Amino acid sequence: MSVENSTHADVSARAPHRHAAYDEATFARLAADAEQIIARYPQARSALLPMLHLVQSEDGYVSPAGIAFCGQMLSLTTAEVSAVATFYSQYKRRPNGEYTVGVCTNTLCAVMGGDAIWQELSEHLEVGHDETTPDGKVTLERIECNAACDYAPVVMVNWEFFDNQTPASAVETVDRLRAGEPVAPTRGASSVCSFKAMSRVLAGFPDGRADEGVGAGEATVRGTRLAREHGWTAPAFPGEGGAGTDETAGMQPEATPGTTEPEPKPRAKRPAGTTPRTRTAAGAPATRTAPEAAKAAGTPEVGAEQSSAQRSPEGPADSSTAAQDKKQQSEQAKES
Ligand code: FES
């Protein structure tokens, strides 16, 4: 999620509904859901993020009534709720389309074709970023990395993955969505649900569809599969024994003859003069507080009596600065 800027037009559009509230039946239904959400947290106000998703599952965006509802349930002011709701782009400030189509234009996806997909979709749908098609079906967005770079370029529909996309495949997807035809993500659920339905899942009410389709894709499991084939294991911590000693941990067996996989390289040797992390007799890593570490390194503690501003010049950089000060004082004396 990223920061979304407010516009004067947004504020003006919402002003007439500032005192909107849910009717009694809707309030009672949402309040029952909210109680479940709030019960998950030690502090009620910590439930605000899922509560905002709950509101979106009802209204399709964070409505004025939704903001008032969250405030009432969590003992927050509407200003406090709005401050959070307006910070994250995943919370919509005006009615969203039935499907949020997000095109990843972050670095890897962009160079792999994400920019071309964005351009094609924007022209095809005749909408820009965070704009919705006139039929209310699709809200198009540029999105940041969704940690699916191994499938770049990636398109998300209501946060379901569509991997290895092209401009043509993305256009086909949005056309099918607008026509009401079933669309299947590459991984996860076997179909795409509506924005409201997805918002309810994000509020913490699973719909049971998460594992319907393909779980992890080929690119994700490739490393694990190779490790199993070659008998590679994670190195042990120094002193723990097991998979390897301190010097040999991380050394991998050579690739199986006949495979074309590159041979993994041994772990880089520790630089001279450094020491391994020590462990206590109980096996737990020995920890130092920051001041202890600073003391051991000969560095004054922050805020201690001798800060860097107080101590005498002693290093090359300090000497250089002192020499410059001396020279400047000498020149000033000559001029006077
Ligand atoms: S850059 Fe697109 S998923 Fe990471």
Image (tube, helix red, strand yellow):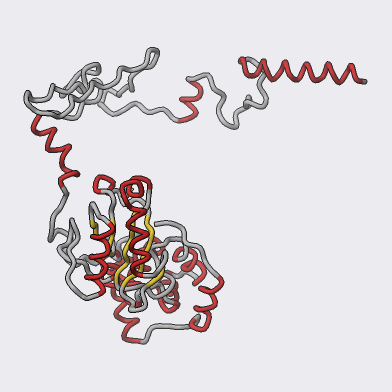
Camera-side residue of 34 and 168:
168
**Residue located at (24% from left, 67% from top):** 205
- Name above or below for residue 150 compared with residue 114: above
Which quadrant of the rendered structure holds the C terminus? Answer: top right
Name the image quarter holding the N terminus: bottom left
Relative height, residue 29 to residue 36 (above, below): below
Q: How many marks?
A: 0
Position of residue 303 in the picture relative to residue 265 (left or right)? right
Q: In this view, does 253 lie above or below 142?
A: above
**Rendered view: 32 above or below 251:** below
Q: 143 or 331: nearer the eye?
A: 143
Residue shown at 43%/61% (left/top)?
88
Residue nearest the observer in this picture, 275 or 141: 141
| Residue projecting furthest to the bottom | 24
Q: Which residue is drawn at 37% across and 86% down?
A: 23
Q: Quadrant of residue 101?
A: bottom left
Residue at image point 37% right, 28% down: 287
Residue 55 seen by the camera: no
Q: In this view, does 156 lie to the left or right of 81?
A: left
Give percent across and percent down for residue 129: 42, 64
Return the residue found at the far right. Answer: 336
Residue 116 at x, y percent in the picture: 34, 55
Residue 48 in the figure: left or right of residue 153: right
List the single residue furthest toward the top: 272
Q: Nearer the viewer, residue 119 or 254?
A: 119
- Residue 117, quarter of the rendered image: bottom left
- Across and down, in percent, residue 299 comes to 54, 22
User: Percent x, y for residue 120?
Assistant: 34, 61
Q: Is residue 206 visible to the viewer in this orientation of the structure?
A: yes
